[in-house]
Image (spheres, helix red, strand yellow):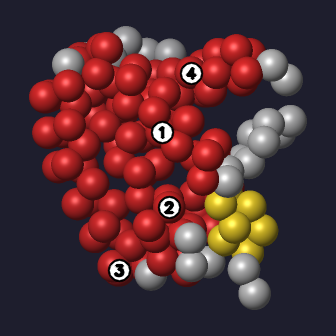
Amino acid sequence: MTRQFAKLWVVGFAATLIAGSPQAQTADETLMKSARSIARIGLIEPICSPFYLLDRKRLAEVKGWMLQDGVERFGAVLIQRTVDRVRSEFLGVIKREGAAGWCPAQRAFYKVPGQPEFIGSPLE
């Protein structure tokens, strides 16, 4: 897979995550979905690295593309402020459920057939 194709695929995947259902969404709903995607992927390395092998380079690329998309759609200040706010939601879930439960859910969430995974095998 070429680098350009991989980038286009990831941007398409991110758009699918953000777009969700085919129903019309408000700008606020789209902003929140984008912020949640960025916050979620931003927590994978610090939270899941004790439990899983991570492809940090791939993870950083995907996170960068999602953030770039958010900045282009909503502006740097608004997307960062919203990411910071929703990040605390994920941290609350992680605190309640534990990282050992949250990380497998992220691995399943981001697993797409035929695409390289950035959350690899569990560490033993």
Gap in angstroms between the C-alphas marked 2 and 1: 11 Å
Kind of residue indicated by mark 2: Glu
The residue wearing badge 2 is 45
Q: Quadrant of the N terminus?
A: top right
The residue wearing badge 1 is 63
Circle 3 SS class? helix
Instruction: Give x and y (percent) for residue 97.
Output: 43, 79
For residue 101, side relative to residue 9 (left or right): left
Neighbours of disc 1 within 10 Å: few (<14), some (14-19), many (20+): many
The residue wearing badge 3 is 96
The image quadrant that residue 72 belongs to is top left
Gap in angstroms between the C-alphas marked 1 and 4: 10 Å
Instruction: Give x and y (percent) for residue 74.
Output: 23, 18
Do the numbered discs 1 and 3 sit on residues whose CB atoms are within 8 Å? Answer: no
Which label lies toward us, 1 or 4?
Answer: 1
Gap in angstroms between the C-alphas marked 1 and 3: 25 Å
Neighbours of disc 2 within 10 Å: few (<14), some (14-19), many (20+): some
Q: Reading the chain from its start, which is encountered first: label 3 or label 2?
A: 2
Neighbours of disc 3 within 10 Å: few (<14), some (14-19), many (20+): few
Q: Is residue 37 above or below residue 119?
A: above
For residue 31, side relative to residue 57 (left or right): left
Do the numbered discs 1 and 4 sit on residues whose CB atoms are within 8 Å? Answer: no
Q: Reading the chain from its start, which is encountered first: label 1 or label 4?
A: 4
Number of dots carrying numbers: 4
Name the disc covering residue 91, or none.
Answer: none
Kind of residue indicated by mark 3: Arg
Gap in angstroms between the C-alphas marked 3 and 2: 19 Å
Circle 1 SS class? helix
The residue wearing badge 4 is 11
Q: Is residue 7 above or below residue 85?
A: above
Kind of residue indicated by mark 4: Val
